[in-house]
Amino acid sequence: QVQLQESSPGLVKPSETLSLTCTVSGGSVSTYYWSWIRQPPEKGLEWIAYIFNSGNTNYNPSLKSRVTISVDTSKNQFSLKMSSVTAADTAIYYCALFPGGYNTGWGQGTLVTVSS
Amino acid sequence: QAVVTQEPSLTVSPGGTVTLTCGSSTGTVTSTHYPYWFQQKPGQAPRTLIYDTSNRHSWTPARFSGSLLGGKAALTLSGAQPEDEADYYCVLSYRTSYVFGPGTKVTVL
């Protein structure tokens, strides 16, 4: 089964850019769809973006202007950058093999706090 | 952007049956929305239970089933167990984007 592990700075200042990386094992980032999904504290899930075929992307329309998803096949990783963050972007960020049908997997999640 | 709806909370007795629904502000939910259902327990990442309306994963207990019901996607839990107490989220596909529902908190009591 695919395993995913997020890495992030943990704390980001308002107006700065958040950068997240997901390391994939047991599967290739060149295959399937890879998503970022977030969950503000005590709230529900929000899909942010996905990438597939190493370069095709789709974004949540409400976040599209601030978000970029990319993949590094040499490291079997995919990444998310979110610009101009505010306190509303404070959340647990999950990377996931999604949508993938039977093929699925989630990272354990990483808490990102936006604060000065 | 579409809005996906779910019941905020439901309670089921041990051994009982409960049905969670997932609706769309755009109208009838169909198989082309490729409904997924996820289970999330406190402090854990979500886990996929059902994909593409009604397909279980290898780890999904047979007591969970997915369907389309009354214009919505539905997740039925038959024979609820204490360990099924959790939050349940559905997500629908809208061509190139996905929208999650707000989640249903299921209490087994």
Image: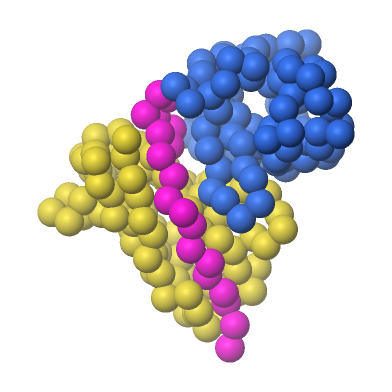
Chain colours: A yellow, B blue
Q: Is residue A34 left or right of residue A15?
A: left
Q: Report the front residue among A107 and A93.
A: A107
Asked if the stretch drawn in magenta spans residue A111, the answer is: yes
Q: In the rendered view, does B103 fall on the left or right side of A45?
A: right
Assign the N terminus of chain B to one quadrant of the image: top right
> Residue A75, position in %: x, y?
17, 56
Q: Main secondary structure of the magenta part?
A: loop
For the C terminus of chain B, the image quarter is top right
Residue at position x 81%, y 33% from top?
A: B108
Residue A27 image point, x, y percent: 24, 39
- Residue A16: in sight, yes or no? yes
* Residue B78 within the segment the image draws in magenta: no
How many circles with numbers are drawn on the protein?
0
Q: Position of residue B52 (x, y in %)?
A: 51, 19
* B49 is higher (above) or lower (below) than B102: above
Question: Residue at horizontal 65%, vertical 68%?
Answer: A88
Q: Provide the residue span drawn in magenta.
A: A98-116
Q: Is residue A35 above or below residue A66?
A: above
Q: Is residue A73 above or below residue B108?
A: below
Of all residues, the one furthest to the left in this rendering is: A74
x 34%, y 61%: residue: A21
- Quarter holding residue A23: bottom left
Residue at (64% x, 60% y) in the render: A40
Q: Residue lying furthest bottom in this view?
A: A116
Q: Can residue B94 be seen from the camera position used here?
A: no
Q: Is residue B62 above or below residue A15?
A: above
Residue A54's image quarter?
A: top left
x, y percent for residue B97: 51, 37
